[in-house]
Amino acid sequence: MKRTFAVLLLLTFITLNTFGQSVSEKKFSSQQLREDLAYLKLQLFRVHAYPYSELSKEQYEQLFDKIDHQLKDSLTNIDFLKLIKPAVAYLSDEHASISLSPKMLPGVYQDEPVFFPLILSKKGNSYYLAKTLSNQTELLGQAIIQIDGIDIKDVVAKCALYTTGYPEQRAEKALAQFGYLYSISIPGAHHQYTIETDSKKAVTVQGVILQTWFNEITQQSGWNLACNEAISYQKINDAGYINACSFLVGDKKIDSLKQRLDVIFAQVQKDKLKYLFIDVSKNGGGNSSVGNVLIDYFYDKSYTTYRCYWKKSEEYLKLVQSWGIEPGNQYKEEQDGGVLHFPSDTIYAESNPYRFKGKVIVIIGNGTFSSAIMFATIIKDNHIAELAGEIPVNGHPNHFGEMYNTKLPNTQIDLRFGVKEWIRPSGEKTDNILRPDITIDPSITREKLVKEVIVKVK
């Protein structure tokens, strides 16, 4: 699975620009908004790989009708965006996003402290203040029952629909990114907010600037944004540690990647190692071919890959053709709206003089996403190596991918989602979670991680 837009890996997760509006705050007529709503509906129904993961077609129709009934007056594009975001949330597509260009972000959001600074946790049916991004710490650990006079359960439920992914994934984000999501879900920009605790105490909370939340969400993602070298190597006693922090390697650079891996694994042979650790715990994805290339350097048997369901649409065909890409006759000749079924491929090992023959452990974590989680899932389902680390909360083995992007014609709101549905090699659908064989905090020092995992490996 190839990711054409590298920056999408970050923007999809944090939806940094979802609250932008034109500098002039232009308003669009109800007719223009209805045209954009109809266009959005058409895109989801015709182009997305499978839009009915959560809502049936009838339920989706009802949702769009509900939005349509609210379009009685003219609105700015940000106000319209806030109405339509749930339509994308319900796709269960963790790569999806609906947003506005950063250049359309009004100054108040760029420069002023208008973002609610709180992160929540949930215990039972109660919500607690787990972290604050400001210096107001008096509420830490306290149960919150209302925000600005609204019941906290209703606020959290609404915030979950302002992000994307599977339902449980959105619920997690609604807590971890609570203040950010709340700020972009309410009308207008606010410099302060009122909280009521379970002791009936009302407290005014001051907002923070956007950069504060940007830094927090970047840290939460686990992605190694300071990844200067996609794949690097370090010897730790009798173990080798390969940090694969990115799969953003274009097809034209695969040969260069192989040359780099030749050098690394030649050194691994010289070091006469017993163990090899491959860390994708902070890998946000890229080109899935990278994972297959990497496997060839430590596995000498055949293995199966993902299977795929690919929705045919003229919209996607025209998009990729505009990039100078021809998807092939099988796709072009499929009827519009049809789904191409691609079974799992079997990859056969070829001769590789640099192949490592010792024990391999793959490290996963919350930053394992997209094609990186596909790599780790192939490892898991084919019993190629053991996984160590933590469950990736933000990535799932089965997911939608191969991104399609367009703009709503009037408001110019950006829309992105997947046209392919990827199913893991095992075919498991009910438990769509990648579980490590060995649980360990992947953020501890490499030396400590290597030492503790070696004790636990089979």
Image (cartoon, rainbow, N blue to C red):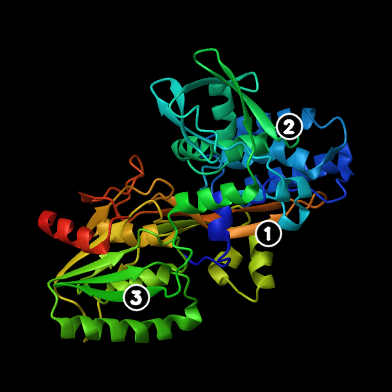
* Residue 106 visible in the snapshot: no
Residue drawn at x 34%, y 66% is 345
Give the label, 3 or 2, closer to the camera: 3
Location of residue 319 with respect to 32 vertically, above or below: below
Closest to the observer, 193 or 23: 193
Measuring from the top left, give residue 25's x and y in whole percent: 85, 45
User: What residue is shown with label 1?
Assistant: 315
Q: Residue 402: x percent and y percent?
A: 53, 60
Q: Secondary structure at mark 1?
A: helix
Q: What mark, if any, has residue 232 been given in the picture?
A: 3
Q: Residue at x 58, y 63 (%)?
A: 7
Query: From where the camera sits, is residue 181 visible?
Result: yes
Q: Amino acid at mark 2?
A: Ile
Residue 75 numbered mark, or none: none
Which amino acid type is shown beneath numbered disc 3?
Answer: Ser
Q: Earlier in the sequence, mark 2 or mark 1?
A: 2
Q: Secondary structure at mark 2?
A: helix
Give the camera-side residue of 374 and 148.
Answer: 148
What's the residue type where badge 1 is placed? Answer: Glu
In the picture, measured across the screen, residue 27 lies left or right of residue 11, that is: right
Residue drawn at x 88%, y 49% as measured from the top left = 24
Q: Is the Cβ of the residue at disc 1 closer than 8 Å to that at disc 3? A: no
Label 2: few (<14), some (14–19) or many (≥20) C-alpha neighbours in 10 Å:
some
Q: Which mark is residue 67?
A: 2
Real-space CA distance between mark 2 and mark 1, rounded to the nearest whole angstrom:
24 Å
- Whether residue 457 sits left or right of residue 292 in the image: it is left
In space, the residues marked 1 and 3 are separated at their CA atoms by 40 Å
Image position of 323 with respect to 119: above or below: below
Give the mark nearest the N terminus, 1 or 3. Answer: 3
Q: At numbered mark 3, what does the secondary structure look like: helix, strand or loop? A: strand
Foreground tag (1 vs 3): 3
